[in-house]
Image (cartoon, helix red, strand yellow):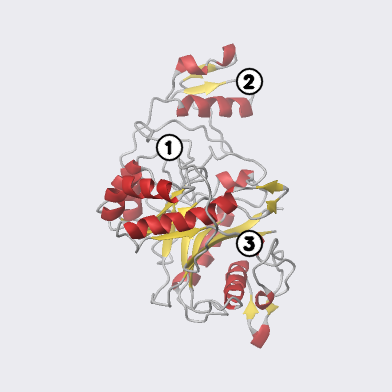
Amino acid sequence: MGPTVAVGLVVVTALFCCTEGFIDMNWGRMSAERLLPSQVVDLMLQNGIRNVRIPTTQSDLLKAFQGSGINLTITLFNGLQPHNMSAARAWAQSKYGLLKVNNIQSVNIGTRVYPFNWGGVYVPDYDINWRSLNYVQDALNEIGLGQTKANIVHYSGELIPNISKPSEDAFRVPALPARQQRPLLDINGVVYTNGFLWQYDCFIWALEKLNFSDIKVIVMAVGWPTDGYPRASGDNAERYFKYLLPMVTSNKGSPKRTGAPIDVFINSLADEPKMRIDALLSPFDRHWGIYRSNGQPKVKVDLSDRGQDIYPTTVKGIMRMPQRCNLGFGKTASYAFNVYFQTGFQNEKACDFEGLSYITDQDPSMEDCLFPVEVVSGNQLIEFSAALALHRPLNVRGAVLMIVLYIFL
């Protein structure tokens, strides 16, 4: 099984107030080469990106976006969610200055959290996040930042399985249908010709059955990987965006919501080769980026949606460490050794690997395997906040619901 598209949806209780769909960006933080936050802000502005989603609340990143005019969705990562009201107040007060001066649209509580037992793995953060949602929103309200909304992530696994058309869907558990090879008809003669609109309308129908038919839906993660699966490639990613982005900005909406703008966040800005592969993540999850982790464009995608066959703009002001790589025996071992060497800022003493590796100034990259060289001064701080304690009874708000979906071949 492999991906055709990853889609994340944020569902907020707002009437259809926007007149046009927007194209915006996810910026992951698990890159092998770490771009400076200021460089990323500049890159977003060059490409006309107005909204950015980042999986952290780190101060150095928030400072970089200050005054940029870019709207942010930030994230309290798994393990950093406040488990009681005191912890939520402490977090909100510590971030008050940065939250106040930035355009923070929402705070995501947790990330990549699946319900129930996903693939045989129980993830307790799912329950923790529901409790934290209430604590964080109350804390934001108390400091006068109630316009910033706390959200939680949901996945396609919460929709009922084995449906034959979107109008049959409702919230429950696993699986979406496989990619269809021919157009499908729904009620009233509605025709679906692609998985994106199919999946989008599955959630619209499911929300309607909960009496939330006037809620606006924002797609928080949509893209096509370029490696890690046989059908993952740069050519397929380019083809996907070539058809997706004009569909979004045409403002035609979906078959279920004709004429209602669809807003999407591209997943993602850059590859994240340091992302851990486990029971919940696959190798292709490292390769969603439209840029390589060093800031070089990887696929042609016109973020201005002018129909141009062009690469997005290149990151400016990149400075790299000397062209030195750490090699071992075999391509796979050499790549792993070098990633460790670069992320340690080419510290030779820490990268001897008991004599199994050596340093070279020759670039060992091949067409199908590029060896990274670290970006100078790109090692941003890593913040940790202890937000632990007892849970309180669950009191789920109906104000905000966040959803992330996956469609598989």
The quadrant in which the C terminus is found is bottom right
Relative to 261, 69 lies left or right: left
Residue type highlighted by circle 3: Ser
289 lies above or below 31: below
**Image point (75%, 68%), residue name:** 162
Considering depth in this image, is 308 or 357 the residue closer to the camera?
A: 357
- The residue pinned by badge 3 equals 156
Report which residue position mark 2 lands on: 329
Q: In this view, does 6 lie to the left or right of 82?
A: right
**Residue 355 placement: quadrant:** top right
Residue 318, placed above or below residue 163: above
Residue furthest to the bottom in view is 188
**Residue marked by disc 1:** 384
Residue occupying the point 69% across, 52% down = 118
Residue 219: image location, x then y, percent: 50, 64
Q: Where is residue 14 in the image (x, y as percent from the top left)?
A: 43, 74
What's the amino acid at mark 2?
A: Phe
Instruction: Label 1: state its secondary structure.
Output: loop
Q: From this viewpoint, which residue is outermost toward the top?
A: 355
Q: Position of residue 51 (x, y in %)?
A: 38, 59
Residue 72 visible, this angle: no
Label 2 crowding class (10 Å Cα cut-off): few <14, some 14-19, many 20+? few
Question: Tag 3, which secondary structure?
Answer: helix
**Which mark is in front, 3 or 2?**
3
The image's mark for residue 197 is: none
Three-letter amino acid code at the position of disc 1: Phe
- Tell me which label, 3 or 2, sits earlier in the chain: 3
Q: In which quarter of the image is residue 256?
A: bottom right
